[in-house]
Image (cartoon, helix red, strand yellow):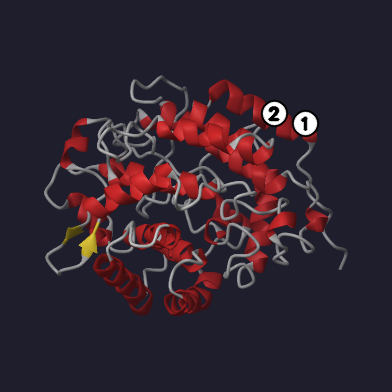
């Protein structure tokens, strides 16, 4: 059989993406694009990210743009950690330190004695938000996210291990031990086959080298056994919300990259092929009929910008699909991974696991459920730096 012709992200296509981001994105997304695609400054990313910090040490101010609450939240603070991680800020960086300290201080025990982090304070209900952040009824948000144990708990656990490795003693050992066992239990019990965010959080933990090797191995084993049948693995799958292979294994060194080699190859080709004429990449979910403003607001613009940033990062360096076998999927050293490496290497572009438009700025924190079509036409937001 004749091999498929290589797909190319041309200089012209990259230029259209760059122009779109420059015209529409927030300063943070512009800095991120510049760092991962054009060799820009990591400090510029850190400075732009710091603008979303609150005086209490947490992050808010619509950093995660589908909740416009100005107050600090687990959602925004975890997003800050994801951005820091994706752009190579070390575990002892001031942004990582303040975010982790805030999360440690805001851990709660639920009725079952588990340590959890509710995504949003009740006060966030008063701010514009996408429908999956609704909490007008008692316990509504906890029910939507299965008690917050897997998502965001497992992802936060990975970040706290990274922080502890860089600054020993910075995370209470009792808390770290307890939440690590909770992460292991999530894998032992298994997660629903359509729970996008739980798989993503487990994959984050699996790729965190600072986490205990035995727990990582158990999680990798579980994910290797289920993900080949659960990730997007056919062209039609990319038309709707699902488990994106590039969210799971964002660089060739990730322990799940080999198990997902076929879906990853398809995802990379789809990324190159799905760029829109204006240079952006569209989200593949909708905002729901209950919140018609979200498709028309800056949330859509910001996610388009992050999608363009990450898609270009995934496909632009080098731009030849034919080099994938020698680079991305072979697990090349970090210094040679720029063709297909995303957020897990300081020198590589991000993907937001944690974290929206394909291939991720991922909606890491979003529940799994069908969504109706979204609408366009960007608006300004008073919360967005």
Looking at the picture, how far across and down is residue 304, in whole percent?
A: 53, 34
Q: Are marks 2 and 1 in contact (CB under 8 Å)?
A: yes
Label 2 neighbour load within 10 Å: few <14, some 14-19, many 20+:
some
Dot 1 falls on a residue whose secondary structure is: helix
Is 144 placed above or below 84 here? below
- Furthest toward the right, the residue is 2
Can the viewer see residue 274? no
Residue 233 lies left or right of residue 55; in this view the side is: right
The residue labelled by disc 1 is: 12
Looking at the picture, how far across and down is residue 160, in whole percent?
A: 37, 59
The residue labelled by disc 2 is: 16
Residue under the image location 48 percent in, 73 percent down: 223
Residue 186 lies left or right of residue 205; in this view the side is: left
Label 1 neighbour load within 10 Å: few <14, some 14-19, many 20+:
few
Can the viewer see residue 360? yes
- Find residue 156 and name its label: none
Residue situated in front as seen by the camera: 74 or 192: 74
Residue under the image location 41 percent in, 26 percent down: 297
Residue under the image location 49 percent in, 36 percent down: 46
- Quadrant into which the C terminus falls: top left
Residue 307 lies left or right of residue 292; in this view the side is: right
Dot 2 falls on a residue whose secondary structure is: helix
């Amino acid at each position: 059989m004749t091999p498929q012709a290589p797909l190319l992200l041309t200089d012209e296509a990259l230029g259209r993406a760059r122009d779109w981001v420059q015209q529409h994105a927030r300063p943070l997304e512009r800095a991120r694009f510049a760092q991962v695609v054009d060799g820009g400054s990591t400090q510029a990313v850190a400075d732009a990210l710091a603008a979303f910090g609150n005086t209490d040490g947490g992050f808010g101010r619509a950093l995660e743009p589908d909740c416009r609450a100005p107050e600090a939240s687990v959602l925004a603070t975890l997003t800050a950690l994801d951005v820091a991680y994706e752009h190579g800020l070390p575990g002892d960086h001031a942004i990582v330190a303040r975010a982790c300290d805030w999360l440690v201080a805001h851990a709660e025990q639920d009725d079952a004695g588990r340590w959890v982090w509710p995504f949003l304070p009740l006060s966030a209900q008063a701010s514009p938000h996408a429908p999956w952040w609704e909490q007008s009824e008692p316990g509504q948000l906890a029910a939507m996210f299965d008690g917050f144990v897997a998502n965001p708990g497992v992802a936060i656990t990975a970040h706290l291990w990274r922080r502890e490795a860089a600054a020993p003693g910075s995370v209470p050992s009792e808390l770290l031990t307890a939440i690590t066992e909770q992460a292991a239990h999530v894998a032992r019990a298994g997660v629903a086959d359509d729970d996008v965010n739980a798989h993503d959080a487990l994959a984050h933990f699996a790729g965190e080298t600072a986490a205990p090797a035995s727990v990582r191995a158990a999680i990798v084993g579980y994910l290797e056994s289920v993900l080949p049948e659960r990730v997007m693995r056919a062209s039609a799958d990319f038309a709707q919300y699902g488990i994106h292979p590039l969210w799971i294994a964002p660089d060739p060194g990730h322990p799940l990259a080999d198990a997902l080699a076929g879906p990853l190859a398809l995802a990379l080709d789809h990324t190159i092929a799905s760029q829109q004429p204006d240079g952006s990449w569209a989200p593949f979910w909708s905002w729901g009929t209950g919140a018609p403003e979200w498709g028309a607001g800056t949330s859509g613009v910001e996610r388009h910008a992050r999608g363009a940033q990450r898609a270009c990062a995934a496909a632009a360096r080098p731009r030849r699909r034919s080099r994938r076998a020698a680079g991305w999927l072979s697990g090349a050293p970090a210094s040679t991974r720029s063709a297909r490496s995303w957020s897990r290497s300081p020198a590589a572009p991000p993907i937001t696991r944690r974290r929206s438009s394909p291939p991720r700025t991922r909606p890491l924190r979003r529940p799994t459920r069908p969504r109706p079509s979204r609408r366009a036409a960007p608006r300004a937001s008073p919360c967005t730096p």
